[in-house]
Image: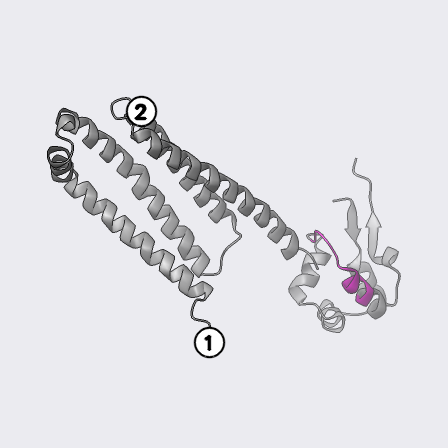
Amino acid sequence: MPIIVNLDVMLARRKMSAGELAERVGITPANLSILKNQKAKAVRFSTLEELCRVLDCQPGDILEYQKEE
Amino acid sequence: MKKRWTENRSLAFTRWCTRIVLALCIVFGAAASPLWQWFLTSLRPELTALLRLFLISSYLLLVPAIAALLLLLRLLRNLADGTVFVPENVVLLRGISWLCAIACGICAASALYYPVFLLFAGAFGLMALLLNAVKNCFGQAVAMQDELDLTV
């Protein structure tokens, strides 16, 4: 899929666990896992907003576009 | 004010009606010969010679009818369990639609010796078409549900 979710990188930088991030953002650990494992088909702006707020980053730090070869 | 008619009651009513119709089909299958004999000799004596053909048509029609009712019962059980927009239900609806189309074909062939069967062929054909449209709707809903389930 062309859109890559770099949550693992941001979690490592902020020294935060996936469980803690899920709790602070207000999504279930299962949904966070869907996002981390590139299985998500869509992300709500509200979720993206909370992720950026909790991780203190920009959407571009979490989402990356990779051209399909 | 308490609602007298709820979705659950409607579903239960539909399931019971389906079971009753299934039972009636089985009873008709068992009693087809005497029933047709009585009907033809009492009401349409000029068609008595066609008894064997009527019996063949009836038994042939019973197969898709019973199969469709069993699939419908399975579909209704899924709805009662809360599994609505799932691929299995799309398959069940496709199956029921095809069985209606088969019944339409049998009735159309039977119209060769008794033209009134054309009306039944038309009815089954219309049912097959409507069920196919409903199946298409379910298919779209399954795709949308899948999209929604993977929206974070």
Vertical arrangement, residue B50 with respect to residue B37, above or below: above
Element under disc 2: helix
Q: Where residue B71 sits in the image (x, y, percent)?
A: 38, 46
Task: Give me the residue at 60% from left, 53% from top.
Answer: B145
Give the label, 2 or 1, closer to the camera. Answer: 1
Question: For the magenta stretch, what is the residue range?
Answer: A40-50
Residue for badge 2: B109
Task: Give me the residue at 80% from left, 65% from top.
Answer: A51
Element under disc 1: loop
Residue for badge 1: B2
Residue type at tag 2: Ala
Comparing B78 with A27, the one in front is: B78
Answer with left or right where residue A47 lies relative to residue B65: right
Q: Where residue A4 sits in the image (x, y, percent)?
A: 78, 50
Quadrant into which the N terminus of chain A falls: top right
Vertical arrangement, residue B41 with respect to residue A38, above or below: above
The chain letter for the residue carrying disc 1 is B
Distance between the alpha carbons at the discs numbered 2 and 1: 51 Å
The chain letter for the residue carrying disc 2 is B
Task: Give me the residue at 83% from left, 57% from top.
Answer: A62
Q: Where residue B3 sits in the image (x, y, percent)?
A: 46, 72
Q: Earlier in the sequence, mark 2 or mark 1?
A: 1
Residue type at tag 1: Lys
- Magenta-span inclusion, residue A43: yes
Residue B15 can be seen in this image: yes
Comparing B88 with A61, the one in front is: B88
Q: How many marks?
A: 2
